[in-house]
Amino acid sequence: MRTDWTRAEIADLFDLPFDDLMFQAQTVHRAHHRSGEVQLCTLLSIKTGGCPEDCGYCNQSASAETDLKASKLMDVRSVLQSAAQAKDAGSQRFCMGAAWRNPKDKDMPAIVEMVKGVRQMGMETCMTLGMLTPKQAEQLADAGLDYYNHNIDTSPEKYGEVITTRTFQDRLDTLENVREAGINVCCGGIVGMGETRGDRVGFVHALATLPRHPESVPVNALVPVKGTVLGDMLADTPLAQIDDIEFVRTVAVARITMPMSMVRLSAGRESMSEATQALCFMAGANSIFTGDKLLTTGNRGDSADAVLFAKLGLKAMEGEEPARAAKACGVAHEHAVAAE
Ligand code: SAM
Ligand code: DTB
Ligand code: SF4
């Protein structure tokens, strides 16, 4: 897979006439993925609020002026109960998120139990706990963690305007620790934070030129929350809101530049029209978060999604995603798809 994309090439993709861009994205998508299948993932906030980081979009930051109630790390039993519900609702992957700068070593035994318990239920596991040391990444790998989510969020240039308490390089360091430990990487970001087209180019470029593409790429549309820096900024300047077509373009360019990755249409679906979501699936998004809650904010809910899937003829993905299947049997990915 190409990891030598230039910014100019990515900018040219963004600039394509919309139907050419969509045609290219669909062509790449169909060469590497089963069309019409969407992976279902469920989120749970296992530790909410009171976070020492100052991410400008996040209502879980202690610096946000929201009425979100902070809570301690959930107990293992309650987490496993939620996971069982998610499995019954047809979810393939259970993603556990904590509002931490980084996990403390004293938290690791409970975290390890959560990973082991969810895996025993036959679901894939994902965690997002902030920065990890190499040792913590190894502990998670030993517990059997399948994916670790850690987003670069935006372009390297824009990053410092959004978060000041940790650097872009800190994020890359954790991603490297996760890779080194042999855990699959889930890494993406947020569109609609008042960034420029150039920032969106820089964001996709940073992902598509990582030494290995993330296996999952979540593309979030900012969920503006009152009391957060960016939520308030958008309320004051509605024109800064992302245009639907520009959002779809971002999904399409991510698909084209990272052909094997799962591209996840993540936060923001609740306020997105069905037509825009349909365009995102056509642009190569093939994974979503299910249920009526993301971590702390609302999501569309399973019945609305069932209606949308029926309208679009989409079905829940079963079995392993292509990138992992190819890795597991040690064959080039193209051969794995061709053999199906
Ligand atoms: N604390 C951990 C961290 O930041 O790495 C994990 C949880 S954090 C909530 C996971 C990701 O959710 C963030 O990196 C960001 O991309 C996304 N996110 C958070 N708040 C959001 C919002 N209001 N709208 C869209 N995406 C959001
Ligand atoms: C990701 O990129 N999006 C998810 C997941 N990774 C952890 C989180 C979205 C959070 C949206 C705001 C909230 O519900 O708190
Ligand atoms: Fe904390 Fe994560 Fe929210 Fe940033 S995105 S404030 S690190 S919970």
Image (cartoon, grey):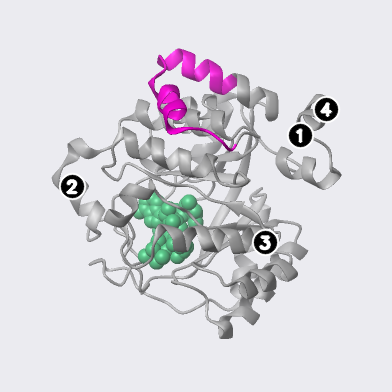
Quadrant of the drawing holding the N terminus: top right
**Are circles 3 and 4 on residues that touch, CB within 8 Å?**
no
Q: Which of marks 1 and 3 is nearer the N terminus?
A: 3
Q: Disc 1 designates what residue?
A: 333
Magenta residues, as a range? 3-26
Task: Please state which amino acid type lies under the numbered disc 2.
Answer: Ala
Q: Does residue 28 sit above or below 139 in this rendering? A: above
Quadrant of the drawing holding the C terminus: top right
Q: Disc 2 designates what residue?
A: 235
Q: Disc 4 designates what residue?
A: 340
Task: Please state which amino acid type lies under the numbered disc 4.
Answer: Glu
Magenta stretch: includes residue 4: yes
- Is the residue at mark 2 in contact range of ligand 1, meaning its CB lies under 8 Å from it? no
Which type of secondary structure does the marked residue at label 1 adopt? helix
Task: Please state which amino acid type lies under the numbered disc 1.
Answer: His
- Is the residue at mark 1 in contact range of ligand 2, meaning its CB lies under 8 Å from it? no
Circle nearer the viewer, 2 or 4: 4
Q: Earlier in the sequence, mark 2 or mark 3?
A: 3
